Amino acid sequence: MLYFHVLGIGYLSADEYRQEVDPSYVRIDPGGARLFGLAPVYRSPLVSPERDAQLKAGMPTIVLAYKEEKREQDTTTYVAYVEADQIAAGKATFERLCFTCHGKLGEGGIGPNLTDDYWLHGGAFPEIVKTIKYGVPTKGMVAWRMDLKPDQIVQVASYVKALHGTNPPNPKAPQGELSQP
C-alpha cells in the first residue's frame, strides 16, 4: 500500500491492464502533484485556489450573517395585540421571566411599577417594545431579543400595556416621567 498508494511508484492493476492492452503505455503524473516526486502533495480541504482567485478578482462572496441592532436605529412600527389569547401568552411569558423584577402584578420591585402613569424609558407602545427588546443594561434590564421571538416580545409588551391602571396592592412609588398612553 505504501509503495503503490502513498509513494505512487509502482503500477496499479489498472496500469498493468493498460500495459497489456498497449505495451507502450507509461503512466505520467502531472508535474507538481507529487512532493519530491514521491508522495502526493497534501492540500487541505479548506484551501481552494479557485475561491482565492475569485476573491482576488473582487467577486463579493462574503455575506454578513449578523447585524448589530440598536434601539436608536429601530424604526419598526409596533402595534399592540388586543386579542385575549395573545395578551394571555404575553402574561404567561411575563409571569415566567419578568415578575422577579416587576412583581407578579406589575406593581414593581427591583424594577419599576408598570401599572402607573410614570415611565423611565417611555410609555408609548413602541417604546415599551424597544425596552423589552433591547433592555437597559445600565439599569439592569435584560435585553430579551436573543431569548424571545419578536412575536413574544410584542405579546409581553401588549400585556404590560394592559397592566396600566390596574392598581395592584403595594405598588412601588412612581419613577420616571409622566406619560399618558
Image (tube, rainbow, N blue to C red):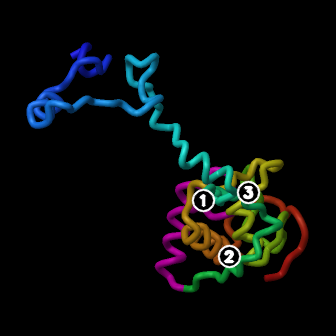
Earlier sequence position, callout 3 versus callout 1: 1
Query: Disc 1 marks which amino acid?
Result: Lys
Earlier sequence position, callout 2 versus callout 3: 3
Left or right: residue 98 versus residue 116 is left
Residue 3 visible, this angle = yes
Q: Residue 104 has which mark?
A: 1
Image quadrant occupied by the N terminus: top left
Q: Residues within 10 Å of mark 3 (few under 14, many from 20)?
A: some
Q: Comparing marks 3 and 1, which lies closer to the viewer?
A: 3
Position above or below: 6 against 14: above
What stretch of residues is rendered in magenta? 83-106
Q: Nearer the viewer, residue 52 or 171?
A: 52
Residue 158 x, y percent position in the rendering: 62, 76
Q: Nearer the viewer, residue 138 or 174?
A: 138
Question: Which residue is found at the position 73% from the left and 57% from the top?
Answer: 135
Question: Which residue is found at the position 54% from the left and 76% from the top?
Answer: 87
Question: Which residue is found at the position 73% from the left and 52% from the top?
Answer: 141
Residue 104 x, y percent position in the rendering: 60, 59
Left or right: residue 124 versus residue 46 is right
Q: Is residue 91 magenta?
A: yes
Q: Which residue is mark 3?
A: 135
